Amino acid sequence: MRVTIVMGGSEFSIDVEPQETVLNIKQKIERLLSIPVASQTLAIWGWELIDGLDMEDYPIINESTKIHLNINSMPALIEEHSKIQITVKFSARKTTFEVEKTETVRSLKEKIHIIDGTPIKRMALYFSGQEMDEEFRYLTNYGISDKAEIIVFLKSTARMIADPPTRRLSLAVQTSSTLLNAATIPLDISDSSTLTELRRLLVTNKILPPDDYIFIHKQRIMRENCSLRWHGVENGDFLYVFKGTVGPGRF
């Protein structure tokens, strides 16, 4: 099929095969325009196309599709541009690490717990003198950007609060064209369920055949042992599933 590539204010068309990978398409563009593959990001409606997947894995692509080509100023993956470096400061120590811009307060607490071992229930996070007390707000909602410093206070046992109650989510799992003819599968599941549990539910109920899959939520590849709450999945959201595996170092 022939698709249209949009770059800035100009457009051009190229022929692609359904079984071609996104990486192959980038290599064609490199030969045509001398733009290095590492500097290219291909996207449809803001959804980045992943190098290792085939064109037929995206049910939204057809001959009328316009694929947007963005040129990165540095040869880096789009995920790198979405990360910020923050410093987490305790009373007697501090640590610096990278987080996603779409990180929530809750997922940041979980990361601190994994890295430092501090109990989540005892954490109170502060930025610029304000307590970040809304678990499901994004860090950016609190004005946090690159190089920000977040202070961790430890609550006394008397002030510890329980984990937020679990919620039932009604969401939709959208498969690719190679799976169930691009079906939309409604699902009701707890937000405390992990991606591993969600995958097992779909396979056990024979909604998906046993295979390797990549799950994507809001243009982000989801992580196996992290909960839907950790990923920021909300009521009514779509999860996109494709055949494939995530290569080493993807995260």
Image: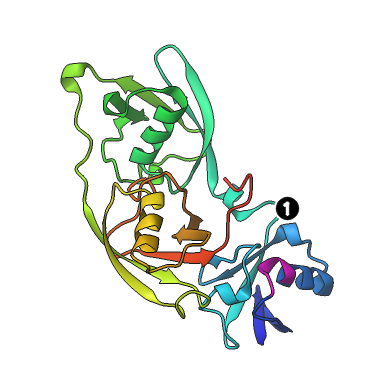
- Furthest toward the left, the residue is 158
Q: Nearer the viewer, residue 241 or 158?
A: 241
- The residue that disc 1 covers is 75
Q: Magenta span has 22?
A: yes
Report the span colored magenta: 20-24
Residue 25: image quadrant is bottom right
At 19% from the left and 29% from the top, the residue drawn is: 161
Picture coordinates of residue 66, whole percent (x, y): 59, 80
Residue 194 in sight from this viewpoint: yes
In the figure, is residue 117 to the left or right of 57? left
Q: Secondary structure at mark 1?
A: loop
Asked if residue 25 lies left or right of residue 211, the reply is right
35 part of magenta stretch: no
- The image shows residue 122 at horizontal and vertical percentages of 28, 23
What x and y, as percent, mark residue 60?
Answer: 51, 78
Q: What kind of residue is marked 1? A: Pro
State which quadrant residue 150 falls in: top left
Residue 109: x and y in percent read 37, 33
Above or below residue 197? Residue 16 is below
Colour mode of the rendering: rainbow
| Residue at screen point 32% across, 48% down | 229
Q: Point out the image quarter for the C terminus.
A: top right
